[in-house]
Amino acid sequence: MSTGTDSEQQAAIDDLKRASAEVAAAQLRDGMIVGLGSGSTARFAVEAIAKRVQAGLRIIGIPTSEQTASLAVERGIALSTLGEYSDIEVTIDGADEVELDTLHLIKGGGGNQLREKIVAAASRRLVIIVDERKLVKKLGSRAPVPVEVAQFGWQATARHLTGRGAAPVLRVGADGKPYITDGGNYILDCGFGSIDDPAALQRELDATVGVMEHGLFIGMTSQVLIGTGEGVKQLEGGAAR
């Protein structure tokens, strides 16, 4: 990674994400129903897909956030809903962390875990685009687990999560007020530290009253496309190629 200024480093990272997004978009074929992820990395995917649409590709996108929907419409991508199309052929999204051996994920930096997971669960394939910084040996190494919680009684939910070993922090927006997801919920960014058993933690979070969804995506990833200084690499079944 470049050792230049912050803006130069960010530009270099963006180039890696953009390259991964273009490889993901190149896999799409006419007539596909495509899930469109949320967050800064997913924006590159929408841009890459839009280029192909402008060149004649015909797909229908299922967005996971209002922000993604607005960008897709602006770029000329036809959209629909899960109500119309319950079977999505592929979803392209980003991740905060990718565990190397398992392809388990922490997602949710974009702030819409519930919608992202609903779309991912309805997809035949989940393709994740990242830059090489997002690869970790164990989940939780760098990123907290975002937990989407009901606004009502969120403090009680936070206390319960604290008892499970989390260090929950209420996410706030640029205005200093609690961030509200498109589903109308709050987000608690929970620092569990290095997670030895992500599946067990997933079960605990799923069983916690007040938790609407969370950023652990366990056993859902089909492919990871990694932007590196040596080009875009793939992870499938835990092996880079």
Image (tube, helix red, strand yellow):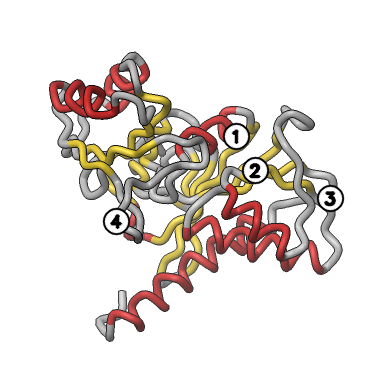
What x and y, as percent, mark residue 55? 82, 68
Q: Circle 1: is it few (<14), some (14-19), or many (20+) Cα within 10 Å?
A: many
Q: In the drawing, what numbered circle is on residue 35?
A: 2
The mark lying in front, picked from 4 and 1, is: 4
Q: Circle 2: is it few (<14), some (14-19), or many (20+) Cα within 10 Å?
A: many
The mark lying in front, picked from 2 and 3, is: 2
Disc 3 marks which residue?
30
What x and y, as percent, mark residue 93? 53, 48
Q: Circle 3: is it few (<14), some (14-19), or many (20+) Cα within 10 Å?
A: few
Query: Alpha-carbon distance for marks 4 and 1?
Result: 29 Å
**Quadrant of the image containing the N terminus:** bottom left
Viewer-closest of 98 and 239: 98
What amino acid type should be assigned to the residue bearing mark 4? Gly
Q: Do the residues labelled 4 and 2 touch (CB within 8 Å)?
A: no
Query: Alpha-carbon distance for marks 1 and 2?
Result: 6 Å
Disc 1 marks which residue?
119
Lower position in the chain sequence, tag 1 or tag 2: 2
What amino acid type should be assigned to the residue bearing mark 1? Val
Disc 4 marks which residue?
176
Find residue 118 and report its image quarter.
Answer: top right
What amino acid type should be assigned to the residue bearing mark 2? Gly
Query: Alpha-carbon distance for marks 4 and 2?
Result: 31 Å
Q: Are marks 3 and 1 in contact (CB under 8 Å)?
A: no
Lower position in the chain sequence, tag 2 or tag 3: 3
Q: What element carries label 2?
A: strand
Lower position in the chain sequence, tag 3 or tag 1: 3
Q: Are marks 1 and 2 in contact (CB under 8 Å)?
A: yes
